[in-house]
C-alpha cells in the first residue's frame, strides 16, 4: 500500500526483516530479527544501562516525541516505554486504555494512528486484536512498535526476556528453556518461543491440555529443527531446566469463565518445587503475577523476574534510539 510513504525511510511491505538496520522500521514481530540484530540491540541496551546507572539520563532523543497508545491494560510495558523515552530526553503522548481519547467516540485505528503520527516520531501500540500493529504499520509513515497484539505477539517483551537470560546465565546457546502456564493465550510465550529458534536451545512446553501452545507456533518451532517436548507435569523436567519461564493464566482471553476457574491455579511454583531445580538457573515471568509463583520465592537468587522487568527499560531505550536512527 502506498499511503503517502514517498520520502519516508520506512520499508514498504509488512514487517520486513531488519537486515538493513532499524532506522525508520516497524517492530511488529520477532520474525524480523536475526542473531546479529539481537546482539546489536543487546549491546546498545548495555550502554543504556550504563548511562542510567552512571548519570540517570541523556539527551540522545531530545526533541523527539513518542505516542504510547494502549487499548489494553499495562503497567510495565507502558511505563517502561515512557521512562525510556524520558531518560533519553524525549517526550511522550501517553494514551491509556483509550478511555479518554476519540476511540470511545468511534474513531478507527487507522484514523487514530494517522492523527498521532502527525504529532509524534514513533508510536508504541497495544491492542486486543491479533495483527493490529501490522494494520497500523500499513497506514503509518512513522515506525510502529508492537507492544502486544491480543494473543498474537509481544516482540519487545521477548527481546527483554532474551536479554535477561543472557545477563543472568551468561549465554543462550545450550540452554534448556521450559515455559509453563498459559501457552495458548500468552503472547509473550508465542514471541519468546519463536525468537529462541535463533539459538541452539531445548524447549519444553508445560501446560494443561486446554492451554497448549498453538499449533502454528509449535510447527514454526519444529520446522526450525528444535528439540521440543510437551508435558503437563512440571515435576518431570524441573531438575533439568536452565530457565523456567512462568506465565499468568490470561483470564481476559477466556470466553467461558468456568474454564478459567478450572485452570487458574494449575501451577504454583513453590520453594519446595524449586528444591528440586538446579542451583544455577533462572525463574522468569513477564509479570503481572497472580498466584503462579509463590511470594516466598522472591528472595531466591534464582528469581530473576524483577531484574527482568528492569531490563525492559534498557531494551526499550535501545529500540527507541535504534528506530529513530540515534543508536
Ligand atoms: C504480559 C502481556 O501483556 O502480555 N505483560 C507484560 O507486558 N509484561 C503478560 C501478561 O499480561 O500476563
Image (cartoon, rainbow, N blue to C red):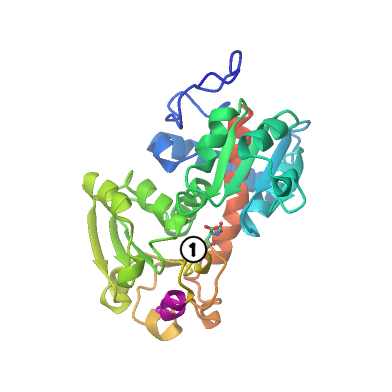
Please check the rendered image and state whether residue 280 is part of the magenta-colored stretch, yes or no: no
Res 133 seen here:
yes
Please check the rendered image and state whether residue 260 is part of the magenta-colored stretch, yes or no: yes
In the image, ligand 1 is in what quadrant? bottom right
- Residue closest to the far top: 7
Sort mark 1 into few (<14), some (14-19) or many (20+) by Cα contacts within 10 Å: some
Q: Is residue 169 left or right of residue 136?
A: left
Residue found at x 32% / y 47%: 197
Looking at the picture, how far across and down is residue 194, in whole percent?
Answer: 36, 48
Q: How many marks?
A: 1
Q: Is residue 265 left or right of residue 288?
A: left
* Residue closer to the observer: 29 or 128: 128
Callout 1: helix, strand or loop?
A: helix
Looking at the picture, how far across and down is residue 76, in whole percent?
Answer: 63, 58
Please say if 28 is above or below 211.
above
Which residue is the site of mark 1? Answer: 253
Please say if 260 is above or below 69.
below
Quarter of the picture containing the C terminus is top right
Chain part drawn in magenta: 258-267
Looking at the picture, how far across and down is residue 31, in whole percent?
Answer: 39, 39
Amino acid at each position: 500500500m502506498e499511503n503517502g510513504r514517498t520520502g519516508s525511510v520506512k520499508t514498504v511491505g509488512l514487517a520486513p526483516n531488519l537486515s538493513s538496520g532499524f532506522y525508520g522500521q516497524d517492530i511488529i514481530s520477532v520474525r524480523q530479527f536475526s542473531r546479529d540484530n539481537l546482539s546489536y540491540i543487546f549491546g546498545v541496551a548495555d550502554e543504556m544501562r550504563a548511562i542510567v546507572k552512571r548519570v540517570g539520563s541523556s539527551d540522545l532523543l531530545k526533541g523527539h516525541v513518542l505516542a504510547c497508545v494502549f487499548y489494553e491494560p499495562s503497567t510495565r510495558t507502558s511505563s517502561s516505554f515512557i521512562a525510556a523515552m524520558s531518560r533519553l530526553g524525549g517526550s511522550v503522548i501517553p494514551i491509556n486504555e483509550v478511555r479518554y481519547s476519540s476511540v470511545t467516540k468511534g474513531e478507527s485505528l487507522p484514523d487514530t494512528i494517522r492523527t498521532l503520527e502527525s504529532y509524534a516520531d514513533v508510536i508504541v501500540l497495544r491492542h486486543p486484536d491479533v495483527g493490529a500493529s501490522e494494520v497500523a504499520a500499513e497506514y503509518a509513515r512513522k515506525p510502529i512498535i508492537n507492544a502486544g497484539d491480543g494473543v498474537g505477539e509481544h516482540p519487545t517483551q521477548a527481546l527483554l526476556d532474551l536479554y535477561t537470560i543472557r545477563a543472568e546465565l551468561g549465554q543462550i546457546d545450550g540452554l534448556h528453556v521450559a515455559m509453563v502456564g498459559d501457552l495458548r493465550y500468552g503472547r509473550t510465550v508465542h514471541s519468546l518461543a519463536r525468537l529462541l529458534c535463533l539459538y541452539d536451545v531445548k524447549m519444553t512446553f508445560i501446560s494443561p491440555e486446554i492451554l497448549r501452545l498453538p499449533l502454528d507456533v509449535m510447527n514454526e518451532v519444529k520446522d526450525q529443527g528444535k528439540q521440543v517436548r510437551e508435558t503437563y507435569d512440571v515435576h518431570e523436567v524441573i531438575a533439568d531446566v536452565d530457565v523456567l519461564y512462568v506465565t499468568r493464566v490470561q483470564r481476559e482471553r477466556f470466553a467461558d469463565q468456568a474454564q478459567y476457574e478450572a485452570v487458574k491455579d494449575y501451577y504454583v511454583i513453590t520453594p519446595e518445587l524449586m528444591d528440586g531445580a538446579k542451583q544455577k538457573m533462572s525463574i522468569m515471568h513477564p509479570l503481572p503475577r497472580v498466584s503462579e509463583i509463590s511470594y516466598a520465592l522472591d528472595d531466591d537468587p534464582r528469581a530473576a523476574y524483577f531484574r527482568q522487568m528492569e531490563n525492559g527499560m534498557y531494551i526499550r531505550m535501545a529500540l527507541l534510539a535504534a528506530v529513530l536512527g540515534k543508536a
